[in-house]
Amino acid sequence: MRVGIFGSDDDLQCQAIAKALGTLGVENILLRDDALDHGLPLSELDGKYIYRGVDLDDIRSFYLRSIPAPYAPAMEQDGELVLYEDWFERYMHQRERATFYVAWLLALQHRGCRIVNGPHAASVLQYKPFQLHALRALGARVPRTLISNDPAAVLAFLAEVKDVIFKPIMGGAITRALNEETLEELPQVVASPVIFQERIEGDDLRIMIVGDRIVSSVAIVTPEQHLDFRDDPAYSGGDAEYRHVELPEPVKEFCRKAARDCGLLFAGIDIKHKPGGEWVFLELNSSPIYLDVELKLGHPISAAIAELLVKP
Ligand SMILES: Nc1ncnc2c1ncn2[C@@H]1O[C@H](COP(=O)(O)OP(=O)(O)OP(=O)(O)O)[C@@H](O)[C@H]1O
Ligand SMILES: [Mg+2]
Protein backbone atom coordinates (compact mmCIF):
# COMPACT_ATOMS: atom_id res chain seq x y z
CA MET A 1 0.00 0.00 0.00
CA ARG A 2 1.10 3.58 -0.72
CA VAL A 3 -0.27 6.82 0.68
CA GLY A 4 0.04 10.19 -1.07
CA ILE A 5 0.99 13.32 0.83
CA PHE A 6 0.02 16.64 -0.72
CA GLY A 7 2.29 19.29 0.76
CA SER A 8 5.84 20.54 0.73
CA ASP A 9 9.04 18.67 1.48
CA ASP A 10 10.18 21.13 4.13
CA ASP A 11 6.86 20.97 6.01
CA LEU A 12 7.45 19.35 9.38
CA GLN A 13 3.93 17.93 9.59
CA CYS A 14 4.27 16.25 6.20
CA GLN A 15 7.52 14.75 7.51
CA ALA A 16 5.84 13.60 10.73
CA ILE A 17 3.01 11.91 8.82
CA ALA A 18 5.52 10.24 6.48
CA LYS A 19 7.41 8.93 9.52
CA ALA A 20 4.23 7.69 11.22
CA LEU A 21 3.26 5.89 8.00
CA GLY A 22 6.72 4.34 7.92
CA THR A 23 6.20 3.02 11.46
CA LEU A 24 3.10 1.26 10.15
CA GLY A 25 5.17 -0.18 7.31
CA VAL A 26 3.42 1.94 4.69
CA GLU A 27 5.22 3.71 1.85
CA ASN A 28 4.39 7.31 1.00
CA ILE A 29 4.86 9.57 -1.97
CA LEU A 30 5.09 13.34 -1.56
CA LEU A 31 3.10 15.30 -4.12
CA ARG A 32 4.55 18.77 -3.90
CA ASP A 33 2.08 21.63 -3.74
CA ASP A 34 4.56 23.75 -5.73
CA ALA A 35 5.23 21.04 -8.34
CA LEU A 36 3.58 22.97 -11.14
CA ASP A 37 5.23 26.24 -10.10
CA HIS A 38 8.57 24.52 -10.66
CA GLY A 39 7.57 22.84 -13.89
CA LEU A 40 7.77 19.32 -12.41
CA PRO A 41 5.96 17.02 -14.82
CA LEU A 42 2.35 16.26 -13.93
CA SER A 43 -0.06 14.86 -16.50
CA GLU A 44 -3.54 13.47 -16.62
CA LEU A 45 -3.93 10.95 -19.40
CA ASP A 46 -7.47 9.71 -19.97
CA GLY A 47 -8.23 9.94 -16.27
CA LYS A 48 -4.88 8.63 -14.95
CA TYR A 49 -2.48 10.94 -13.14
CA ILE A 50 1.25 10.64 -13.69
CA TYR A 51 3.47 12.70 -11.39
CA ARG A 52 7.20 12.95 -12.15
CA GLY A 53 6.97 9.78 -14.21
CA VAL A 54 5.18 7.80 -11.50
CA ASP A 55 1.72 6.36 -12.11
CA LEU A 56 -0.39 7.14 -9.03
CA ASP A 57 -3.41 5.08 -9.97
CA ASP A 58 -3.08 2.55 -7.12
CA ILE A 59 -3.16 5.19 -4.38
CA ARG A 60 -6.47 5.41 -2.56
CA SER A 61 -5.52 7.44 0.49
CA PHE A 62 -4.05 10.93 0.78
CA TYR A 63 -3.01 13.39 3.46
CA LEU A 64 -3.66 16.92 2.22
CA ARG A 65 -1.58 19.47 4.08
CA SER A 66 -1.74 22.28 1.55
CA ILE A 67 -2.74 23.05 -2.00
CA PRO A 68 -1.67 25.83 -4.32
CA ALA A 69 -3.89 28.88 -4.54
CA PRO A 70 -3.59 31.92 -6.77
CA TYR A 71 -2.41 35.03 -5.00
CA ALA A 72 -1.53 38.59 -5.99
CA PRO A 73 1.95 38.47 -7.60
CA ALA A 74 3.51 41.22 -5.52
CA MET A 75 6.89 42.06 -4.01
CA GLU A 76 8.05 44.47 -1.34
CA GLN A 77 9.71 47.66 -2.52
CA ASP A 78 10.65 50.47 -0.11
CA GLY A 79 8.31 49.03 2.51
CA GLU A 80 5.38 48.82 0.12
CA LEU A 81 3.86 45.95 -1.83
CA VAL A 82 3.99 46.48 -5.58
CA LEU A 83 2.74 44.21 -8.34
CA TYR A 84 5.14 42.60 -10.77
CA GLU A 85 5.00 44.17 -14.22
CA ASP A 86 3.74 40.88 -15.68
CA TRP A 87 1.26 40.40 -12.82
CA PHE A 88 -1.66 39.51 -15.07
CA GLU A 89 0.18 36.73 -16.88
CA ARG A 90 1.58 35.37 -13.60
CA TYR A 91 -1.80 35.43 -11.92
CA MET A 92 -3.49 33.68 -14.84
CA HIS A 93 -0.83 30.95 -14.85
CA GLN A 94 -1.28 30.46 -11.12
CA ARG A 95 -5.00 30.20 -11.59
CA GLU A 96 -4.61 27.55 -14.27
CA ARG A 97 -2.15 25.56 -12.12
CA ALA A 98 -4.32 25.78 -9.01
CA THR A 99 -7.42 24.76 -10.95
CA PHE A 100 -5.69 21.68 -12.41
CA TYR A 101 -4.48 20.71 -8.93
CA VAL A 102 -7.86 21.13 -7.23
CA ALA A 103 -9.61 19.29 -10.07
CA TRP A 104 -7.18 16.40 -9.45
CA LEU A 105 -8.19 16.32 -5.79
CA LEU A 106 -11.87 16.49 -6.67
CA ALA A 107 -11.41 13.58 -9.09
CA LEU A 108 -9.70 11.53 -6.35
CA GLN A 109 -12.54 12.27 -3.99
CA HIS A 110 -15.05 11.35 -6.68
CA ARG A 111 -13.28 8.00 -7.14
CA GLY A 112 -13.89 7.32 -3.46
CA CYS A 113 -10.32 7.91 -2.26
CA ARG A 114 -9.85 8.96 1.33
CA ILE A 115 -8.45 12.49 1.57
CA VAL A 116 -7.59 13.94 4.96
CA ASN A 117 -8.99 16.59 4.46
CA GLY A 118 -10.81 16.93 1.16
CA PRO A 119 -10.16 19.87 -1.18
CA HIS A 120 -13.29 21.75 -0.10
CA ALA A 121 -11.58 22.16 3.28
CA ALA A 122 -7.94 22.44 2.25
CA SER A 123 -5.84 24.78 4.28
CA VAL A 124 -6.57 27.86 2.25
CA LEU A 125 -10.30 27.34 2.27
CA GLN A 126 -11.74 27.99 5.69
CA TYR A 127 -15.31 29.09 5.70
CA LYS A 128 -15.72 30.33 9.25
CA PRO A 129 -19.26 31.66 8.74
CA PHE A 130 -20.34 28.21 7.54
CA GLN A 131 -18.62 26.55 10.50
CA LEU A 132 -20.48 28.84 12.88
CA HIS A 133 -23.69 27.92 11.09
CA ALA A 134 -22.93 24.18 11.45
CA LEU A 135 -22.03 24.55 15.13
CA ARG A 136 -25.16 26.59 15.87
CA ALA A 137 -27.33 24.07 14.04
CA LEU A 138 -25.99 21.35 16.36
CA GLY A 139 -26.93 23.40 19.39
CA ALA A 140 -23.30 24.11 20.34
CA ARG A 141 -22.69 27.42 22.07
CA VAL A 142 -20.99 29.95 19.76
CA PRO A 143 -20.33 33.63 20.52
CA ARG A 144 -22.97 36.11 19.50
CA THR A 145 -21.83 37.00 16.01
CA LEU A 146 -22.41 39.67 13.38
CA ILE A 147 -20.78 39.27 9.98
CA SER A 148 -21.27 42.43 8.03
CA ASN A 149 -19.94 45.20 5.80
CA ASP A 150 -22.46 47.65 7.23
CA PRO A 151 -21.04 50.18 9.73
CA ALA A 152 -24.51 50.94 11.12
CA ALA A 153 -25.13 47.24 11.84
CA VAL A 154 -21.76 47.06 13.61
CA LEU A 155 -22.59 50.05 15.83
CA ALA A 156 -25.96 48.54 16.73
CA PHE A 157 -24.26 45.22 17.58
CA LEU A 158 -21.70 47.02 19.75
CA ALA A 159 -24.42 48.94 21.59
CA GLU A 160 -26.17 45.68 22.40
CA VAL A 161 -23.26 43.34 23.09
CA LYS A 162 -20.81 45.93 24.59
CA ASP A 163 -17.61 43.85 24.67
CA VAL A 164 -16.87 43.09 21.01
CA ILE A 165 -13.90 41.67 19.08
CA PHE A 166 -13.39 41.46 15.33
CA LYS A 167 -11.47 39.16 13.00
CA PRO A 168 -11.31 38.35 9.30
CA ILE A 169 -13.60 35.82 7.65
CA MET A 170 -10.84 33.84 6.00
CA GLY A 171 -8.22 34.39 8.71
CA GLY A 172 -4.77 35.81 8.27
CA ALA A 173 -5.01 38.62 10.83
CA ILE A 174 -4.98 38.82 14.60
CA THR A 175 -8.23 39.19 16.55
CA ARG A 176 -8.64 42.73 17.91
CA ALA A 177 -10.99 44.48 20.30
CA LEU A 178 -13.56 46.93 18.95
CA ASN A 179 -12.76 50.04 20.98
CA GLU A 180 -12.40 53.78 20.57
CA GLU A 181 -9.21 53.40 18.59
CA THR A 182 -10.29 50.62 16.21
CA LEU A 183 -13.73 52.20 15.71
CA GLU A 184 -11.96 54.93 13.76
CA GLU A 185 -11.32 52.32 11.07
CA LEU A 186 -14.97 51.26 10.96
CA PRO A 187 -15.82 52.99 7.63
CA GLN A 188 -13.32 50.59 5.97
CA VAL A 189 -15.63 47.66 6.70
CA VAL A 190 -17.60 48.56 3.57
CA ALA A 191 -14.74 47.09 1.50
CA SER A 192 -15.38 43.53 2.74
CA PRO A 193 -17.41 41.93 5.54
CA VAL A 194 -15.73 41.25 8.88
CA ILE A 195 -16.68 38.93 11.76
CA PHE A 196 -17.71 40.82 14.91
CA GLN A 197 -18.23 38.73 18.03
CA GLU A 198 -19.09 38.94 21.65
CA ARG A 199 -15.81 38.65 23.55
CA ILE A 200 -15.63 35.36 25.42
CA GLU A 201 -13.45 35.17 28.53
CA GLY A 202 -11.49 32.10 29.45
CA ASP A 203 -8.76 29.70 28.40
CA ASP A 204 -7.97 28.96 24.76
CA LEU A 205 -8.53 25.27 24.21
CA ARG A 206 -7.37 23.34 21.16
CA ILE A 207 -8.98 19.99 20.45
CA MET A 208 -7.46 17.63 17.87
CA ILE A 209 -9.92 15.19 16.44
CA VAL A 210 -9.01 12.44 13.98
CA GLY A 211 -11.98 10.54 12.60
CA ASP A 212 -14.09 10.03 15.69
CA ARG A 213 -11.12 10.04 18.07
CA ILE A 214 -10.35 13.01 20.24
CA VAL A 215 -6.59 12.61 20.31
CA SER A 216 -5.64 15.75 22.19
CA SER A 217 -7.46 18.39 24.20
CA VAL A 218 -5.36 21.09 25.81
CA ALA A 219 -5.45 24.61 27.16
CA ILE A 220 -2.75 26.86 25.71
CA VAL A 221 -0.86 28.30 28.66
CA THR A 222 1.10 31.53 28.20
CA PRO A 223 2.43 33.78 31.00
CA GLU A 224 0.13 36.67 30.05
CA GLN A 225 -3.41 36.69 28.73
CA HIS A 226 -3.65 38.05 25.19
CA LEU A 227 -6.89 38.53 23.29
CA ASP A 228 -5.47 36.34 20.51
CA PHE A 229 -2.95 33.83 21.86
CA ARG A 230 -0.97 34.01 18.61
CA ASP A 231 -0.13 37.60 19.49
CA ASP A 232 1.67 36.38 22.61
CA PRO A 233 5.46 36.45 22.23
CA ALA A 234 5.73 33.29 24.35
CA TYR A 235 3.45 31.45 21.91
CA SER A 236 5.07 32.76 18.73
CA GLY A 237 8.51 32.09 20.22
CA GLY A 238 7.66 28.42 20.72
CA ASP A 239 7.52 28.72 24.53
CA ALA A 240 3.82 28.02 24.96
CA GLU A 241 2.92 25.27 27.35
CA TYR A 242 -0.08 23.02 27.19
CA ARG A 243 -2.25 21.62 29.94
CA HIS A 244 -4.40 18.59 29.28
CA VAL A 245 -8.10 19.41 29.72
CA GLU A 246 -10.68 16.69 30.23
CA LEU A 247 -13.72 17.42 28.08
CA PRO A 248 -17.22 16.50 29.24
CA GLU A 249 -18.88 13.90 27.01
CA PRO A 250 -21.43 16.36 25.47
CA VAL A 251 -18.59 18.67 24.38
CA LYS A 252 -16.75 15.72 22.83
CA GLU A 253 -19.91 14.80 20.98
CA PHE A 254 -20.27 18.36 19.63
CA CYS A 255 -16.67 18.16 18.39
CA ARG A 256 -17.30 14.86 16.59
CA LYS A 257 -20.55 16.04 15.02
CA ALA A 258 -19.19 19.46 14.04
CA ALA A 259 -16.16 17.90 12.32
CA ARG A 260 -18.45 15.47 10.49
CA ASP A 261 -20.90 18.19 9.44
CA CYS A 262 -18.04 20.34 8.12
CA GLY A 263 -16.70 17.34 6.18
CA LEU A 264 -13.47 17.12 8.19
CA LEU A 265 -11.73 13.82 8.95
CA PHE A 266 -9.11 15.71 10.92
CA ALA A 267 -9.72 19.03 12.66
CA GLY A 268 -8.26 21.38 15.22
CA ILE A 269 -11.20 22.85 17.07
CA ASP A 270 -10.86 26.14 18.97
CA ILE A 271 -12.93 26.49 22.13
CA LYS A 272 -12.98 29.17 24.85
CA HIS A 273 -13.64 27.91 28.35
CA LYS A 274 -13.53 29.29 31.85
CA PRO A 275 -13.34 26.72 34.68
CA GLY A 276 -16.90 26.04 35.75
CA GLY A 277 -18.25 27.99 32.78
CA GLU A 278 -19.55 27.33 29.30
CA TRP A 279 -17.68 25.70 26.43
CA VAL A 280 -17.84 28.21 23.57
CA PHE A 281 -16.86 27.06 20.07
CA LEU A 282 -14.89 29.42 17.82
CA GLU A 283 -13.87 27.48 14.73
CA LEU A 284 -12.62 24.26 13.14
CA ASN A 285 -9.20 24.35 11.47
CA SER A 286 -8.89 21.90 8.60
CA SER A 287 -5.10 21.77 8.52
CA PRO A 288 -4.15 22.74 12.06
CA ILE A 289 -0.61 23.06 13.29
CA TYR A 290 -0.14 20.45 15.99
CA LEU A 291 3.48 19.30 16.23
CA ASP A 292 4.30 21.48 19.24
CA VAL A 293 1.64 19.84 21.39
CA GLU A 294 2.55 16.40 20.03
CA LEU A 295 6.19 16.88 21.02
CA LYS A 296 5.55 18.55 24.37
CA LEU A 297 2.74 16.33 25.69
CA GLY A 298 3.32 13.21 23.63
CA HIS A 299 -0.22 13.23 22.21
CA PRO A 300 -0.07 10.80 19.26
CA ILE A 301 -1.68 13.02 16.60
CA SER A 302 0.53 12.07 13.62
CA ALA A 303 0.11 8.38 14.49
CA ALA A 304 -3.68 8.75 14.64
CA ILE A 305 -3.71 10.46 11.21
CA ALA A 306 -1.49 7.73 9.76
CA GLU A 307 -3.78 5.04 11.21
CA LEU A 308 -6.82 6.75 9.68
CA LEU A 309 -5.04 6.95 6.31
CA VAL A 310 -4.30 3.23 6.21
CA LYS A 311 -7.59 2.04 7.71
CA PRO A 312 -9.45 -0.19 5.20
N1 LIG B 1 -15.21 35.79 20.33
C1 LIG B 1 -13.99 35.72 20.85
N2 LIG B 1 -13.78 36.00 22.17
C2 LIG B 1 -12.55 35.94 22.70
N3 LIG B 1 -11.46 35.61 22.02
C3 LIG B 1 -11.58 35.32 20.70
C4 LIG B 1 -12.86 35.37 20.05
N4 LIG B 1 -12.67 35.04 18.76
C5 LIG B 1 -11.35 34.80 18.61
N5 LIG B 1 -10.68 34.98 19.77
C6 LIG B 1 -9.24 34.78 19.99
O1 LIG B 1 -8.55 34.89 18.77
C7 LIG B 1 -8.00 33.62 18.35
C8 LIG B 1 -8.16 33.46 16.84
O2 LIG B 1 -9.52 33.43 16.48
P1 LIG B 1 -10.14 32.27 15.58
O3 LIG B 1 -9.63 30.97 16.06
O4 LIG B 1 -11.60 32.44 15.50
O5 LIG B 1 -9.61 32.59 14.14
P2 LIG B 1 -8.17 32.38 13.45
O6 LIG B 1 -7.36 31.46 14.28
O7 LIG B 1 -7.71 33.73 13.09
O8 LIG B 1 -8.47 31.68 12.14
P3 LIG B 1 -7.42 31.05 11.18
O9 LIG B 1 -6.70 30.01 12.01
O10 LIG B 1 -8.27 30.51 10.14
O11 LIG B 1 -6.50 32.18 10.79
C9 LIG B 1 -8.78 32.59 19.18
O12 LIG B 1 -8.08 31.40 19.32
C10 LIG B 1 -8.96 33.35 20.49
O13 LIG B 1 -7.76 33.37 21.24
MG1 LIG C 1 -8.03 29.72 15.38
Image: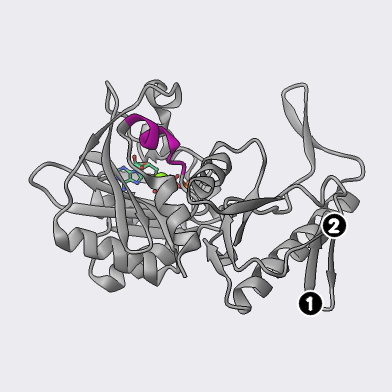
Mark 1 to mark 2: distance in Å? 15 Å
Between 163 and 45, the residue placed more toward the observer is 45
Secondary structure, mark 1, is loop
Residue 63 makes an appearance in the image: yes
Secondary structure, mark 2, is loop
Circles 1 and 2, Cβ within 8 Å, touching? The answer is no
**Residue at image point 80% right, 35% down:** 82
**Residue at image point 33% right, 51% down:** 197
Three-letter code, disc 1:
Gly
Q: Position of residue 28 (x, y in %)?
A: 62, 52
Nearer-N-terminus badge (1/2): 1
Q: Which of the 4 image quadrants contains residue 300?
A: top left
**Residue at image point 19% right, 42% down:** 245
Residue 285 makes an appearance in the image: no
Residue at the front extreme of this rendering? 25
Label 2 neighbour load within 10 Å: few <14, some 14-19, many 20+: few
Residue 103 lies left or right of residue 215; in this view the side is right
Q: Where is residue 90 in the image (x, y as percent from the top left)?
A: 86, 49
Task: Give the residue pinned by disc 1.
Answer: 47
Task: Give the residue pinned by disc 2.
Answer: 53
Q: Position of residue 87 (x, y in %)?
A: 86, 46
What stretch of residues is rendered in magenta?
A: 289-296
Quarter holding the N terminus is bottom right
Residue 79 lies left or right of residue 53; in this view the side is left
Label 1 neighbour load within 10 Å: few <14, some 14-19, many 20+: few
Asked if the magenta segment contains residue 202, the reply would be: no
**Residue at image point 63% right, 78% down:** 111
Between 1 and 303, the residue placed more toward the observer is 1
